[in-house]
Image (cartoon, rainbow, N blue to C red):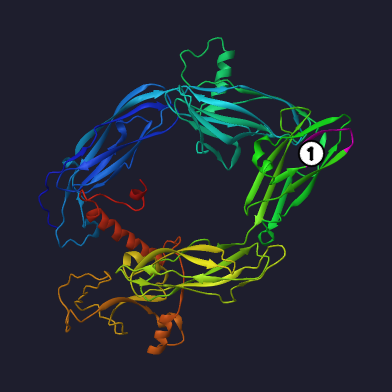
Amino acid sequence: MEEHEVGHTKVVFLEPRILFSNSPQGLTTWRKAILHNVGQNHAYFKVCDQSLLSTINIVPSQGIIPFGGLTVLNISCTPTVAEKFDTRAKEQILHNKKCDDNCQNKSCDIYNMVAIRHANVIDLRIGGSVEIADVEINPGVFNFSGTYVGATQIIPFIIKNKGITRARVEFNLQDFEYFSLDFQRIREEEQGSSVSRLLVVRGHFTDPAFPDIYSLEVEEGTSLECGIAFSPKEVATYDFCIQVQINFFEASELYTKCCLSKSPMIPKTTPLIRPCYVQATVLQAPLRLSSTDFTFEIPFYTMDPNNKVTKTQDLVLHNTSKQDVKWTLDISNNGKLFKDGTFKISVLSGILQPHNEINVSISFCPSHPTKYTADIPIHLNDNPICYRKLCLVGEVKSPKLSFDPPFIFFAPVPLDVTTKMNVNILPQNYFRDSTLDVQIPTVSLLDGDEAQPLSVTFPKGCIITGSSSGINAQLTCHLSFKSSKPVSFFTDILFCDNRDNWFLLPVTGTAENCLLTIYPYMATHLDKQTIILKEDKSDISVKSGENVLLPYQEAGLLSSTFTKCNDAEPAKKKLFVGIEIIPERLNSGKSKTSKEDKDKSMKKEEKNEHFSSLEEGTKAYDFFEKVVHAAQTWFSLFGWPEGPHSLSIPETIRR
């Protein structure tokens, strides 16, 4: 192997210093550093971690930087001690030598490393400061006095991060049955501001293996409003404390030890917080309810604007105690639904004597075809704690269709190949027979023309059989996709019943002969079909030994760059990528198939197959690896506007 002279290789950091300011003790913080190869050769780098702090980690620790390319280093810092730090990461850069054109070693296609004496070292300075989390929980004492069996009482509390770094707060309720944390309303409030906003519960998470351990992340200078819920099932008393972790430190246990110790921890070296104390007394339920859930359903076809339909159900209250019970239904939060008459309750309050009962009528009278809900708290003996909650649901049952699957994705296929999929149509709330009609939209091709590549059939008919319960049998439709020209589309197929109710089924599909697009199809059909180059859409395959001209097509599939065409005029000869069924795989007992049988096989529909996980060692897996390698090589060399850039699938794409 002949060696050539090695040119100068130079790699620099775009930013020579990385700062981790106010990093939280016990948590991981990430930063990025970028290596830029400003030399004329490829470079190999390696992180020299001997000089790094144990709390610093850099990935990747080694790799290739193409000439003119960039590589991103992800740097993590997980400090355990509150202190300032300053360290240096040394990057060892190795030059490369080029191989002779006749080299047979495949690993030498791009580069080979030379001796270590050609290496140079560049420094990356990493510094910062570590802060101790400062968290406060208010109130720290929760007193559940007089909670009835079967009821749920929630006491709100605020978690305030008073520090200058983020904090992770964890509550362990594994040993406390009937207690849980409530995150239905999480409110974030910036300190020093009167503005607060409701949050999606993105800062709260639990491990499915430990559902009674709750964790929250609170940004610096903010507060979160949460709640602790108590839902007892038996008469009992409770008196305990909840230990709190902050940034994975046993903060409340350490706080208790410091308070009991004669020499408290001064200065503070880890997060500290008081434990949360809980006291609860459970009372026997004095009132029994016939039900707490009331559902009203009205068929849409019975709706009459001149004669409203009303449904009524009864709630039975029974006093099981030896004393009078004063009960109240609180509709203050649902005033509009009761004011316009959508819901009506015959009696809203009263006093029930021992062992007596009362019937309360609940009515539903809708004015519009939609769904209505109302939650009605029940209070006993003027106690502000909610004893039970009535859940009222009223719905006008309008006809609707749902689809299984709800979204149709046709995997990319070659041109002139038909792919199919069966779709289950699930009708609901059809009380009378109805007939479905389908409207299939046209789609725009890549050359600007319009086409209709989709077709829909109903193998067992398109009539929905009505039922008195509104539960209807499913229908099956057969959806096919085929295009002779390149197309990629997203559209909606419209299904309509004979009452002018419209329902949409989203569909997307792609058909073309670009190998980088249809490689999943090729991988899943390796044993059934082969990819060939055809001329004039005939069965005559072009031999691979010829220098083949691929003339320009308006569809844009074939390149206009060429060098030679054997015995044909370029302007008249048309070539295209086609699919050929492998006869021996379809009919193992026959060695030959006629042209007519072959054409029939070509017209056969292919089941829509998606490229799922592959087993290593299979033909499809090997094919997929070749496609990935080809894509990595091309995009690494030509896919970046600033020059070559090292790309690895899927790691680079996920960054």
Of residues 414 and 330, the one nearer the viewer is: 330
Q: Amino acid at mark 1?
A: Val
- Residue 585 versus residue 124 in the image, above or below: below
- In the rendered image, the residue lying farthest to the top is 262
| Relative depth, front residue between 558 and 398 | 398
| Residue 462 on image: x %, y % | 58, 73
From the image, which quarter does the N terminus lie in?
A: bottom left
Q: Residues within 10 Å of mark 1 (few under 14, many from 20)?
A: few
Q: Is residue 53 above or below residue 96?
A: above
Residue displayed at 20% across by 42% down: 116
Compared across the picture, whether 200 is left or right of 81 comes to right
Mark 1, residue position: 347
Q: Which residues are magenta?
A: 346-356
Residue lying at 44% horizontally and 31% vertically, measured from the top left: 27
Residue 338 appears at what percent x and percent y?
69, 42
Residue 247: in sight, yes or no?
no
Residue for point 22% across, 42% down = 36
Q: Left or right of 6: which side holds 639?
A: right
Report the quarter where the C terminus lies.
Answer: top left
